[in-house]
Amino acid sequence: MALYADLHRHLGGSVVPRILWRYFQRQNIDLAQQFPKYPEFEEFYTRERNTLDEYLELHTLVESTQTDKTLPYFIYRLIRGAYIFENLAYLELRYTPYLRTSEQLTQFERIEQMRTIVEIVGKASQVKEYPMITSQILCMHSRLPYEVNKAIVDLAAEMRDYVCAIDVAGGDAHYAARLDEFVGLYKYARSLGLKTTGHVYETADGCYPELIPYLMRIGHGIQIPLRHPELLKEVAQYQQCLEVCPTTYLKTGTLEDLHELKIVFDRCFEAGVDIAICTDNAGLHNVRLPFEYENLLTQDVIDFKQLQACQDAAFRHAFAWPYGQRPATLLTGLLQNTYSEDREEIVLT
């Protein structure tokens, strides 16, 4: 059995449409009336958008429902689906905790409540009947003030039992006016020993070479091989990994055809840059991780050797995977050792 690691999945975009629609019908009268029939909701929820900003607006729909009371409901179903339907052994969930706090509170009170949110997500992710390793990446956000973003970094440093890294989200085109601020926050995070990734080089308007030295992985990063291949040598030297989320680029209008990613994979493999294939928003796309691999393979974007290299890279670059190799390798080694011991016993008797 192939086991997978997903390094780039948003908590807000992880809720599959059927689960979200059922929640509306049972718990949210306004949204239930807005979407009375499931087929119409699925079409609205999963259709392609014209821009990344338009696409990101869907996150606000889900974020408004993910509160301290409802998060266990959504996360249990997320973990169940990831284990049963995706064969995930490892999952990093990323989100902005401030956006799950109560809007009725003051900014200071919402910052304090973030700790509770992280704890709820951490405990809800540990489901005994669906065992997998999970961790959280806390996202700073381009729409949030500096004080809140710094508090997110501090919280990540304080809650390492649940949190493996920090990120910045909110649409990479919107960092420009505050670039020095985000560079400073990443420097601060690295000084605290935090691991880092960041949504950059996803779109043509989100290319910031100033951030590259402070990232351990690059969220998306497809514009590096597409538009700035001269940076691949630097990325390889930093041993960074690109978190490539294929379906996202079709849903956001960033790419018109999946085959455009072939040059991304070919140039990265040639330069020695690792790629981890990820879902980003499996619920919004209604596409689970094994199908991301299958779509790339069947459309001749990658071959089987590259597929296996990407599977290995995902575990190798996972921030909280404790074993240093992917589960298939561990299982093979275990079986070989058992077989050898059995043979020795038979010979001795």
Image (cartoon, helix red, strand yellow):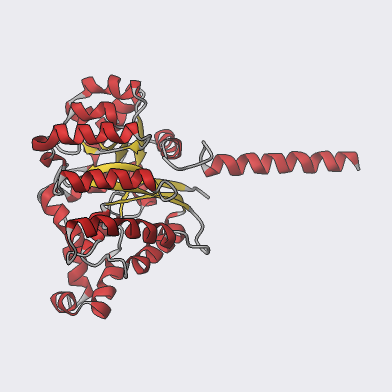
What residue is rendered at 38% in x and 36% in y?
303
Locate residue 205 relative to residue 310 in the image: left or right: left
- Specify whether residue 16 is in view: yes
Count of numbered circles on the image: 0
Q: Nearer the viewer, residue 4 or 75?
A: 75
172 or 116, which lies in front?
116
Percent position (x, y) of residue 268? 31, 27
Quarter of the rendering containing residue 184: top left
Q: Quadrant of residue 264?
A: top left
Q: Residue 50 in the image: x percent, y percent?
A: 9, 50
| Residue at the image point whose x is 47% and y is 59% from the top | 126
Screen quadrant of the C terminus: top right
Q: Residue at x 28, y 74 (%)?
A: 23
Residue 105 as seen in the image, left or right of residue 270: left
User: Could you say which is closer to the camera, residue 53 or residue 211?
Assistant: 211
- Whether residue 134 sits left or right of residue 64 in the image: it is right
The relative height of residue 349 versus residue 180 in the rendered view (above or below) is: below
Rendering quarter of residue 80: bottom left
- Give coordinates of residue 223: x percent, y percent: 19, 32
> Between 212 and 252, which is closer to the camera in this rendering?
212
Q: Looking at the picture, how far across and down is residue 253, in whole percent? A: 14, 46
Establish if 184 lies above or below 4.
Answer: above
In this rendering, does residue 241 appear at all? no
Q: Is residue 320 left or right of residue 103?
A: right
| Relative height, residue 130 to residue 94 (above, below) | below
